[in-house]
Image (spheres, rainbow, N blue to C red):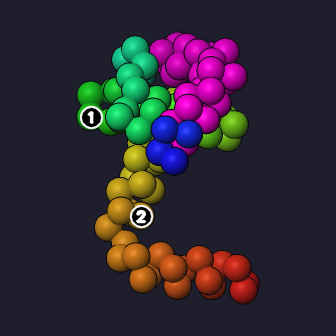
Amino acid sequence: MNACRRVASVSTYTERTNEIARAVDLLRQHGVTVSFPMQTAHGEIIFAVGKDFTLTADQILGLLERDELHSEGVRKLVEAAEKQARTPMRSQAESLEQHKSG
């Protein structure tokens, strides 16, 4: 099952190569250092961004979709991810339930 997931994941990135390249170019135009793409053992495409961050291709595409492809957008995304990582799983589940019902 993991092999199928990996293949599907990589094919998704292949289909979106032009969008990913455009997003990376836009980040670089804004003065943000972005590495060449790397692939994790699980088939996910990642980039070193700036001095301290690693973003997935999906996260970079999300920034593109929200028109936040600049250093401030990267910083906000990383801060939100760190905050979510510090939130206990139970609290995340409760937040999700509240969001669904509200």
Residue 10 counted in the magenta span? yes
Q: Quadrant of residue 9?
A: top right
Question: For the residue marked with disc 2, what is the amino acid?
Answer: Gln
As rendered, which of 65 and 17 lies closer to the eye?
Answer: 17
Magenta part, dominant SS:
helix
Residue 39 versus residue 42 in the image, above or below: above
Q: What element carries label 2?
A: helix
Residue sitting nearer the eye, 93 or 62: 93
Tag shown at residue 84: 2
x then y, percent, for residue 92: 47, 76
Location of residue 49 (image quadrant):
top left
Upstream in the sequence, badge 1 or badge 2? 1
Task: Provide residue 86's location: percent of width, then percent of height.
Answer: 32, 67
In three-dimensional space, the C-alpha distance between marks 1 and 2, rounded to whole angstroms, equals: 18 Å
The quadrant in which the C terminus is found is bottom right
- Chain part drawn in magenta: 5-31
Bin the neighbour count of mark 1 within 10 Å (Cα to Cα): few under 14, some 14-19, many 20 and up.
few
Q: Residue placed at 64% from the left, 30% from the top?
A: 12
Query: Where does label 1 land, which residue?
Result: 52
Q: SS class of the residue under badge 1?
A: loop
Residue at position x 53%, y 19% in the image:
24
- On the question of residue 49 being in view, the answer is no
